[in-house]
Image: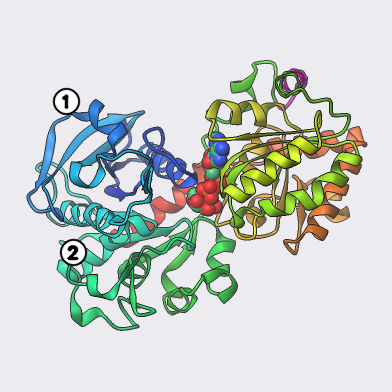
Amino acid sequence: MAGAKLRGRVLSVASECVPLVKTGGLADVVGALPRALAAKGWDMRVLLPAYRALRADAQSWPVVWDEADLWGGPGRVLAGEVAGVSILLLDAPHLYDRAGGPYSGPGGEHPDNAVRFAALSWVGARIAREGLADWKPDVLHAHDWQAGFAPAYLAYHGTGGVKSVITIHNIAFQGWAPAHMLSVLRLPGHAFHPEALEYYGGISSLKAALVTADWITTVSPSYAAELMRPEFGMGLQGVIVARAPVVSGILNGVDTEAWSPAAEDPSFGPKSLAGKAAARAKLCEEFGLDVPGPLAIVVSRLTDQKGIDLLPAVIPDFILGGGGLVVLGSGDPGLEGAMRNLAARHPGRVAATIGYDEGLSHRLFAGADAVLVPSRFEPCGLTQMYGLRCGTLPVVSLVGGLADTVIGANPATLAAGAATGLTFHPVDALAFGHALTQLLEVYQQPKLWAKLRANAMGHPVGWESSAAEYAGLYERLTA
Ligand code: ADP
Ligand code: GLC
């Protein structure tokens, strides 16, 4: 923050943050936003649970907060800095020192997740309201259901003058708990009605935030509009409509240093594609592929949201047309099996790696010709933006942030020099198949392909303008 005038202080509360812990794009955003805002004069800190993998390294960090009674044990907050971001780790071993990921262990999802993330939200709200010894935020910024109770705790236990923002990264995850937990969760009985905390007979931490936060954002303008409709609102559309005046969509950015052609190969940039050809050749060698047409990739959670089940229906024709595919992902066991089958049925043309592999994901974006994102809904999506940045043409369904970041090729957008990829709608195998046919055709036209690729690589995907929008929001809230 050196040099910039102090604009204000913001405490982000979240369950994931790169490079410490990540299961999806939430972590990227929670990690990148503070860095982008710090450069604009915002003093940002991120409160996260001290999961098992994070505890050891933080034991030497100073303790800046103590909490005696955190649902079955004490907690303390350790302060440190990681990759240029000020981190506050909530160390409460009875809640977070467990095997596995942030939400589940070897035996499946943790049964006490409602309490585990209520504890995170509770401490976030208290720090916001009372301040640390030397730091008190002006804004508490909660991310997703895991931090959803934080704005509610401010609203019902006192705000201490702090404003709150909830960002919806994915409304499919709502943080549900049964009604009898209301007092256990330190929520007031008088607020248990449909206009406040009650949600289909129970409690939802995301709804709690939506009814109590001073402002609601989501991660793209299109998703903000979609959330007001039942097809996308997933039961919460009425709540969003009721609060429409304080809802806005602010598009995510991506880390343009980590995701850049030059980061993969110095000879690869918008003006020279020699490095891209080399990266493609290496990729084909790594996976034993021989692909005469476009080499496509999918890097994704393998879930219903992502439309992965459409691949087995459309890929065989794409292969016949000369295309190839590498899938990197994990998730639903049925979809993992379907991806393995696809690879087994098309040796030399399709490969599937089931798992999570950051290094491989970079090699894939560097070397591939196209990235497929056939999501049924997509709040923002990051991989289509990695594709734009690396000249790996995005082929996307026209939903949410995909519609806001990719301009589909058609005669008008091509004439205007605006097209950056291929888009399709509705989200079904027929429309997706058409888009892949278009991909095969465009690939056969080197001039057109080069033009699209240049447009894509020129499309801004960094944090600059979105960070300015968040800064403007914080300023309006605290004015
Ligand atoms: P979501 O958060 O819904 O999963 P996003 O597109 O916003 O979708 O973000 C997903 C992030 O996770 C991206 O950074 C993507 O590259 C990464 N990712 C997803 N699956 C894998 C995987 N199997 N290996 C490496 N990175 C992955
Ligand atoms: C969620 C969404 C994804 C978005 C990410 C970061 O996981 O599914 O679309 O990009 O959050 O905001």
**Is 298 included in the stretch rendered in magenta?**
no
* Residue at the extreme left: 68
Q: Which residue is mark 1?
A: 60
Label 1 CB-ligand 1 distance < 8 A: no
Q: The residue under label 2 is which amino acid type?
A: Thr
The answer to whether the residues at label 2 and label 1 have Cβ atoms under 8 Å apart is no
Front one among 355 and 276: 355
Looking at the image, residue 86 sits to the left or right of residue 470; the answer is: left
Percent position (x, y) of residue 381?
Answer: 58, 49
SS at circle 2: loop
Magenta extent: 270-281
**Is 271 included in the stretch rendered in magenta?**
yes
Looking at the image, residue 192 sits to the left or right of residue 439; the answer is: left
SS at circle 1: loop
Q: The residue under label 1 is which amino acid type?
A: Ser
Query: Residue 444 falls in which quadrant of the image?
Result: top right
- In the image, residue 476 sits, relative to residue 243, either above or below, namely above
> Which of the two discs, 2 and 1, sits closer to the camera?
1
Badge 1 crowding class, 10 Å Cα cut-off, few under 14, some 14 to 19, many 20 or more, is few
Q: Which residue is mark 2?
A: 159
